Image (tube, rainbow, N blue to C red):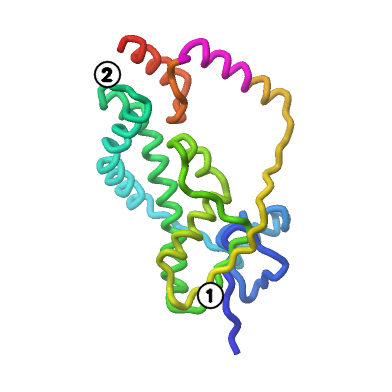
Amino acid sequence: MKRIKKIYIDKVDEKFNFENSLALGPWCFDGIKEIDEVFSFYKKKYFITINYNKNFLLLSRKKFYKKNIIFFSKCIKKQNKLKDIHLKVITKFISPWVLFIHDIFYIYLQYIKYLKKNFGNKKIVIIKYYKPINLKPNSFYEFYLNSHKLNYFSSLIFFLLKKNHSKQWKFKCENYELKEKKKFNFFVILVKKIKIFFENFFFPNVIEVYSMNFIQKLILSKLLKKS
């Protein structure tokens, strides 16, 4: 009798079998295997690798930007009560952020497409090791921060796969809490304190939600003062 294949999306466990298991990416072996060994797994196809089409990615970016830039600008304007700021000004500041959103979801969708294409009609068990988190952010900036985290990435993929999955698929969540390592670094803390001081001094009227750089915040602060 053929064993059901197991797909691990965030971390492998002691039941991971190289003959009948597959990891979503190299991060699944973090803290378990040495980096040299993980690199050898790439050649042996123990985890999924996505080959991106550069031309298709650029075209997808262009369509997404054209369709959503005004929508996001209006949301930012309303959320921050920028009544007297023209939309064109806001779009210039949030353009990199809008493209970032596209790239995040573009990556997510590539993994989902891969699983549907290769295992759509097969019996598999999709395993999430860590407990899923709340996917709905309270603000755009919170989404930006969360999108860099492994558990947000795997939680969203787990949710999307469950929402539109094959009848042959089963889902299992171990619900282990993800404990992030906190490293105390005096220099990093000092730089952060200095950065906050200068930001409060030069542009106290700017809310950081767009991941803007210093110059962009300074310009926006000047525009807000004139309004």
Looking at the image, the residue that sits furthest to the bottom is 1
Answer left or right for 170 relative to 105.
Answer: right
In the picture, the disc for residue 124 is: 1
Which residue is located at x 38 percent, y 45 percent?
A: 102
The amino acid type, in three-letter code, at marker 2 is: Asp
Name the N-terminal-most of marks 1 and 2.
Answer: 2
- In this rendering, position of residue 68 left or right of residue 159: left
Residue range highlighted in magenta? 192-204
Indicate the secondary structure of the residue bearing disc 1.
Answer: strand
Give above or below for 126 relative to 105.
below
Point 60% across, 82% down: residue: 3
Q: Nearer the viewer, residue 120 or 50?
A: 120
Residue 95: x %, y % from top left? 35, 33
Nearer the observer, 27 or 128: 128
Residue 79's image quarter? top left
In the rendered image, residue 38 lying in the magenta stretch gets the answer: no
Q: Which mark is residue 84?
A: 2
Q: Please tell me how crowded label 2 is: few (under 14), some (14-19), or many (20+) other residues with Cα within 10 Å.
A: few
- The answer to whether residue 203 is magenta is yes
Are the two marked residues, 1 and 2, in contact with CB atoms closer than 8 angstroms?
no
Figure check: 151 above or below 146: below
* Quadrant housing the N terminus: bottom right
Q: Is residue 163 above or below residue 227?
A: below
Q: Under tag 2, what secondary structure? A: loop
The prevailing secondary structure element of the residues shown in magenta is: helix
Residue 210 rendering spot, x and y as whole percentages: 43, 30
* Quarter where residue 14 is shown: bottom right
